[in-house]
Image (tube, helix red, strand yellow):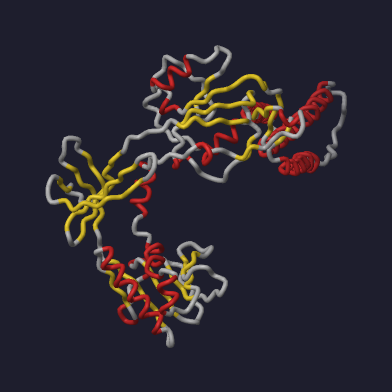
Amino acid sequence: MVFANPSYLWALLGLLVPLAIHFWSKKEARTVKIGSIQLLDESNSRQSSSIQLNEWLLLLLRMLIVALIVLLMAGPQWRINGNQKQITYLVEASIANEPSIGSILDSLHEDSPVFLLKKGFPEWETDIDYSGDQEQPNYWQLVQKIDSLRSDSIVVFTKAMVKGIRGMRPNTQKKIHWVVMESEETQDVPLLALNGESGVELITSSSNSVATGIHRELLVDGFEIFDSGDSLRLLSSAAKTVPLISLDTLHINMYVEENFEREENYIKASFRALSAFLKREIIIHKEEDILPNNETTLNIWLGNEANDHPEGKWLIYWPNPMAKQLIELTNAKNIYHLTSRLNPKNTVEKHLPEQLLDILDLNKELKALVREVDVRQLDETEINPNYVEPKKKRERATMIDISLWVFCLLAGLMILERLIANYKKQ
């Protein structure tokens, strides 16, 4: 047995805990004065022996439970010999019923196993309809699990979606060949509508295997707004309901100390440009006109004095000569730093208005919707993990995750321990 995270094995020192509890819980003997021992029966000694034996059994069970919990944390794996000659095929569920894939898989040798590219790698079956399975697999997360397959060579039929890549590029000791099923279809999907001063604008995503674009269209007719005001129905041959977002006025609180008037002017000018670009009113509040922090989109502090206002979103002047941008996110949530005094050069070259627009984060709903409809694809070189050549024959072995078996054994021992403890009242 080997472990994915062997450093957790240090926690086996926790076996001392039930052992210490066992010895400390022993009660001291009491002296009881009796008139005669003739009525004492031999069964008392047998009962006492049974209690002591039962205590040791409970101690053993509890130590085993602690040990199994540590093993689960360490990621137990079992080493088996791989098959260097066999090729295993994986196919993404959403394309498993496509004729081009079906003809290829049907022509494979009977000894070549075929699995679905999803958690647990379930076996592919010819008589099942997988067209409704549109779950997006996380390719690189599954690559880490591919090492548990016995074959050294893996062929993967996939859409290779960009949205299926999350996390760091993994390492693998398997030779993986990706067959990307390219799609030339372009999907135009209405995402949401914006209700502003100029009217209702519909935002549509147009996505294909190469690029994803966003288009805005001013709606004159062909739609209806629900009474709740938070959604809109498009009256077309394929009626569709999309979220409706009202473009309310943005309110900015600005606190300005003496000698920071220049920074104030540059920031105000940037917000005027953003207001024209967004077609949305932006009001800056100062001094007696300040609003409560929770009623503003952004609070700005321009000064050398310390500022500690955790409520709301803040942009605080905090000089940092090593910073690469004018505005940087800090470790604290919703706290940003203005890293330099402003001047005509850095305001233009470092794109102050664009950075202010980023921290306003006005399109978070739109970004989430775009990710869902994004159908851009990667090529084989982009999706490939890092191949690591095994240096020893031992390293070529396939690792099988046995965490589920260990968990089942742990659950059984915990139930047994509770039954014995309740029966003996210990």
Q: Where is residue 168 in the image (x, y as percent from the top left)?
A: 57, 45
In the foreground, 420 or 219: 219
Q: Say which residue appears at 35% left-offset and 74% top-offset.
A: 253
Q: Say which residue appears at 73% left-offset and 40% top-offset.
A: 6
> Which image quadrant is residue 349 in?
bottom left
Residue that protrudes farthest toward the top in the picture: 110
> Which image quadrant is residue 294 in?
bottom left
Q: Say which residue appears at 44% left-offset and 35% top-offset.
A: 136
Residue that protrudes farthest toward the left in the picture: 221
Q: 204 above or below 342?
A: above
Q: Can residue 213 be seen in this view?
A: yes
Q: Position of residue 39 (x, y in %)?
A: 83, 23
Left-right relation of 274 to 168: left
Q: Position of residue 208 (x, y in %)?
A: 35, 40
In which quadrant of the rendered image does the N terminus lie?
top right
> Which image quadrant is residue 262 in?
bottom left
Q: Position of residue 66 (x, y in %)?
A: 71, 37
Left-right relation of 400 to 117: right
**How many marks are shown on the rendered structure?**
0
Q: Say which residue appears at 40% left-offset and 41% top-offset.
A: 376
Q: 7 above or below 256?
A: above
Q: Is residue 312 visible?
A: no
In which quadrant of the rendered image does the C terminus lie?
top right
